[in-house]
Image (cartoon, rainbow, N blue to C red):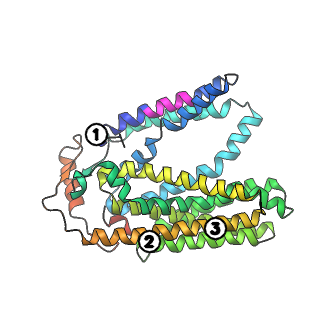
Amino acid sequence: MRVRPERARRQMSAGLVVGAVGFAGLGVLPGAPAWLLAGCAFLAGSAPAASAGGLRSMLTGRLVPKHAVAQALSVESMLMSGIWAVSPALVTGLALGVAPWVPPLLAAGLVLAAAAGLWLLPEGWDVEESAAEGRSMLRLLGGAWPVYVTGAASISLLALAELLLPALLEQRSIGVGWSGPLLSLFALGSAVGAFLYGARSWPGRLRTRSVVLMGGVSACATLVALIPDTAGIALALTAAGVLQAGAIITRNLALQEVLPSSALAAGYSVMYAAASAGYAVTGSAAGALLEVTTPDRAILAGVVLTLVMVAVGAWGEGRLGRRTAAEPPAAGTSSAKSPARGGAAAAASGAVAARPEGPAVGGGGDAERGL
């Protein structure tokens, strides 16, 4: 919420540098007291936290044309899924095969490289004045709550897969060591799904697409709970990854429909927090159920919780859409550019002002609507 477009690069760079210090502390102080290591871990996670939302705002609000936003988000999702697929094996191999301090120091180096790389990018992103500019940031972000609820649901099934898969494999008399390869298939499926989502236009509203995709992910999770053999579980998890990637992209695009550009960076960050909360709630509930029931039933209970969240989010988005449609258009709005843009900024903002407001016209769907 405190990142400002005109100072975003400096703010994000500072956060990344501080986060790198936290990672480095974990690597060079292995014998430190637990409270100090906990502080380093908290610093490593919290200091760079604004970078995800800020970089996504820079990507969609400055670096790519409006008609390519869906494709850009798809490529971002592919990159993230690839990292999720590779990182666990890389970290384990380095920690066990080289030394335990290597992964956190490698993380510190990568974060410092990201801080340096930010200076190859623009200072920030463009924002457009709108009728919502007079409202507080908290009210703007709070008004988008249905998108956050569905976003939390989109990640909650990942918690089911990661936290309950080992117990499920043990119940099926399958080696627990299969959980790593199976989760890698899930991540690779997400990369494929992100590519497929960005490769073409898809019919229907974002809300409808999200519900359909989340219904498919829930069906795959149900199959994971019911299928007895490894091959079937692998296929169901891969399919779940393919569908989940599209669901997550629809949530990021939906934020652009309900928030002004000045609040998007904060909105993306709140979405990340909501997704983390969904992960924690679903995982904790499913883990507690393991005390009283079997892993397959715990997964099915998590699926039910996810579907409830999807229903609540879809209902809220429907109300939000009707209220937005009923509001009169703002009069006399204009584009407020980042001061560094100069004449090029005027041309770019003019292109934004002239964008079509209506049906999707590009690969990936509704990226242009309501930005």
Q: Is residue 239 shown to the viewer in this render? A: yes
- As drawn, the residue found furthest toward the left would be 332
Residues drawn in magenta: 15-23
Q: Mark 3 highlights which residue?
A: 303
Which of label 1 and label 3 is nearer to you?
3
Q: Residue at x 35, y 52 (%)?
A: 264
Question: Is 361 on the left-hand or right-hand side of 100?
Answer: left
Element type at marker 1?
A: helix
- Toward which corner of the image does residue 226 lie, by quadrant? bottom right
* Residue sitting at x 37%, y 43%: 1
Secondary structure type for disc 3: helix
- Mark 3 and mark 2: Cα distance apart in space: 18 Å
Residue 19 highlighted magenta (yes or no): yes
Give how far apart the Cα atoms at labels 1 and 2 are: 36 Å
Q: Earlier in the sequence, mark 1 or mark 2?
A: 1
Residue type, mark 3 in image: Val
For disc 2, the marked residue is 315
Compared with residue 63, is residue 194 higher up or lower down, i.e. above or below? below
Q: What residue type is labelled 1?
A: Glu
Q: Magenta includes 155?
A: no
* Figure check: 184 above or below 209: above
- Relative side of 347 to 235, left or right: left
Q: Is mark 2 on a helix, strand or loop?
A: helix
Pick the residue in front: 196 or 38: 38
The label shown at residue 6 is 1
Provide residue 189's location: percent of width, then percent of height: 62, 63
C-alpha separation, residue under disc 1 versus residue under disc 3: 43 Å
Could you say where residue 55 lies in the image, as x and y percent from the top left? 41, 46
Binning the other alpha carbons within 10 Å of mark 1 as few (below 14), some (14 to 19) or many (20 upward) gives some
